[in-house]
Image (cartoon, coloured by chain):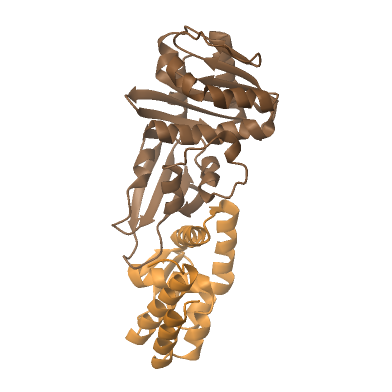
Chain colours: A brown, B orange
Amino acid sequence: MTLADFVDEVRTDRKTLVVYANEAAPDVAAHFATRNVTVERESLPADGPDGFVVLRDGGDFVGAFGLIDLAELLSPPIDRPWDRDDGSQPWRKLYEIFDDASFTSFDRRQMLGATREFENRAWRVGTGALRVCFQSERAYRAQADVYRRLAADTDLEIHVYLADDWTRSTPDAIRVHTDLGPEIARYWALVFDAEGDPTNACAMLAEERDPNSFFGFWTYDPDRVDAMATYLRDRYE
Amino acid sequence: MCPESSHGALAQILATDVASDVMRALSARERRYVMYYLLDRGRVSTDELGDVLAGWTAATERGVATAADRESLLVSLYHSHLPALVDAGLVEFDETEDVVTRASLSGSVRDLVRAVYRAERRSAVPNER
């Protein structure tokens, strides 16, 4: 088993994203046009309603939402996990809709936006293990203050995985696993087990296939989350 | 409500020679959406109408329509909205094929469907344009 296998496993799902929009609407759904998600387009009159999107899984309706909320999900604010507590932004509801749907060509900011969503969940739950692959020491350094506060304000057990070295001081609640090699260098991952609570377990995993271009998925499937946590623990701790 | 746009719609509605059962049929938002969509398409399955009503409503309300929301839209479509539109002579509903077809509509009915849709859109999003 490798991290690539988790990405492949999700790709066997069959989802369809039907975008109803007029022709001038931005093509935001393209980020989900992957092997497990087929994007179809239906045109709306130019003076018609705002665009909307319907997600189906194997023919069954999963959810529908405004195109504007998908566009906002893809241009997320630069914030902190504890800034997202009021749940007032409609686009945040879409994370659960896109459960196990693979995405492509996410840039760092889009990855960070999604990561914040799962960090926010870990922050709210406050217990359980949070495992985060940062690729490089440099990437972790940029988030070290956020993780210091996560560790200080919660009872989370935090594991940080780095492909290279880490020499700076770290709070006791954070275990930094270093020099882990090429697999960790390629993957951006976050796995939160919510201490076994199936309603709050979540994970995201993406491979940096080209510089600043990530292919991956996120999931709320507790079994998948558990398998990913087990893999990281057995392989790298 | 923006006074100018509602006045414009009202003037248009008063100027049209439309039977009162058509006006009544268009009193529900779902029926206005169905008619506006059918102006463009002519013929759609109820399955597609369920998706369109769920998506359109979710986009208007800035929320997510779940499978349960869509199911209850379909229930009211079958039990209330389609019968009202059929009675008003605006659509035909083939129950064996589950397909809704727009009836042939006069120009004034088409204008009315567009006018009420536009007035609703402007009043729902006052800051737009």
Above or below: residue A127 compared with residue B45: above
Residue A165: give x, y in percent of width and height: 47, 8
Q: Position of A120 compared to A11: left or right?
A: right
Above or below: residue B13 compared with residue B92: below
Camera sees residue A225 = yes
| Extreme residue toward the left, this view | A23
Along the viewing direction, whichever of A51 and B46 lies nearer the viewer: A51
Residue A21: give x, y in percent of width and height: 36, 57
Along the viewing direction, whichever of A15 and A91 lies nearer the viewer: A91
Q: Quadrant of residue B13?
A: bottom left
Circle count: 0
Q: Quadrant of residue B72?
A: bottom right
Above or below: residue B42 compared with residue B104: above
For the point 48% across and 36% down, the residue is A113
Along the viewing direction, whichever of A224 and A103 lies nearer the viewer: A103
Residue B10: give x, y in percent of width and height: 44, 86
For the point 32% across and 65% down, the residue is A45
Residue A137: give x, y in percent of width and height: 45, 15
